[in-house]
Amino acid sequence: MGNETAAHYVRSVEYTDYARRLMAHSSLADVAEYGRVMEAGREYPLFRLTVPGSRWLVITSGFHGEEPAGPLTLAESFAEIVAYARARDVGLRVYPCINPSGFEVGTRYNRSGEKPNNDFLRYEVAPGTWKGELARGESFLRWELYDGGPKETRAVRADIVRFPAPAAALDIHQDNYLSVAATYAYTFGDAAAYRPLMEAAASHASVIRNQKVDENHHTDGDGLIVSHDGSVTDYFTRQGVPYTAALETTTRTPLASSHAVNLIWIRGFIDLAARGGT
């Protein structure tokens, strides 16, 4: 893609064409619809791609429509990903494009203006007081699976929770706010598991170390952030999944570089899942 940014590229991708790319992988995976959503008078199918294995990795992507690199990596490199997983007996449950209407028009939210990200959990921080995101170090009384939110979130959440907790979970995002080509990640668990992935990614995009990425989040020296934000990553962490992350490359990063970073983390999470677990 040269220096073309991912956010620009997505505007030329029709979701029907993207769905055909997914269906082309039906010889490698069970390509199933887990739901359908209506946006602007049009029905969009939602897909899960499943490859069996003895330990499981869940990959989610495309919560935000202006973050296309994840969905495109999964569609274009799925055969390579499956081969790597099968060689390690790791099963895959892949939700490649959770917000199809936003993906199609390159908007962060769906075409109704709803925000499909987060909304997996709610935290009770005081008796009767609930919130979707904890401040750093904030204590809470309990958490509950949330049952509301946008239609896309409700659909993927309902499907995800039907299955036992996996051995690892990776959510692929992009940052459309920072004005540099770079990468960082939200992670839980032992940072040592993620340092090699970030170091490998550094050959394709600058790692944002010890810097503020928005008003509430600041990376550490490894380019990692811990944030209990009610997201799918947060949910898997509360389920006891030992390896969970939300990977970010900026939309200013050339698409080929974002693909390379995504594949480093996908392969790395397959390796982590292969270590053992559910």
Image: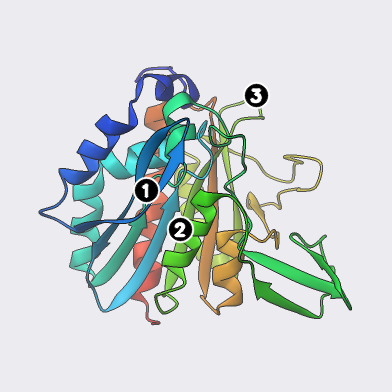
Q: Are marks 3 and 1 in contact (CB under 8 Å)?
A: no
The C terminus appears in which quarter of the rendering? bottom left
- Specify the label residue 140 is tagged with: none
**Residue 235's spot in the image, x, y percent?**
58, 68
Q: Is residue 253 visible?
A: yes
Q: CA distance from mark 2 to mark 1?
A: 11 Å
**Residue 188's spot in the image, x, y percent?**
61, 66
- 273 to the left or right of 205: left
* Looking at the image, residue 274 lies above or below residue 205: below
Answer with mark 3 or mark 1, whichever residue precedes in sequence.
1
* Looking at the image, residue 19 lies above or below residue 35: above
Query: Which color scheme does this rendered protein use?
Result: rainbow
The one nearer the camera, 184 or 75, is 75
The one nearer the camera, 11 or 177, is 11
Q: Are marks 3 and 2 in contact (CB under 8 Å)?
A: no
**Residue 121's spot in the image, x, y percent?**
65, 66
The one nearer the camera, 106 or 88, is 106
Q: CA distance from mark 3 to mark 2?
A: 31 Å
Answer with mark 2 or mark 1, whichever residue precedes in sequence.
1
**Residue type at tag 2:** Val
Kindly identify which residue carries mark 2: 156
The image quadrant that residue 86 belongs to is bottom left
Q: Within 10 Å of the Cα at label 1, are there few (<14), some (14-19), or many (20+) other Cα atoms?
A: many
Look at discs 3 and 2 and give the one toward the viewer. 2
- Residue drawn at x 53%, y 29% as measured from the top left: 251
Kindly identify which residue carries mark 3: 179
**Residue type at tag 1:** Pro
**Residue type at tag 3:** Ser
Kindly identify which residue carries mark 1: 96
Q: CA distance from mark 3 to mark 1?
A: 26 Å
Q: Secondary structure at mark 1?
A: loop
- Residue drawn at x 10%, y 54% as measured from the top left: 27
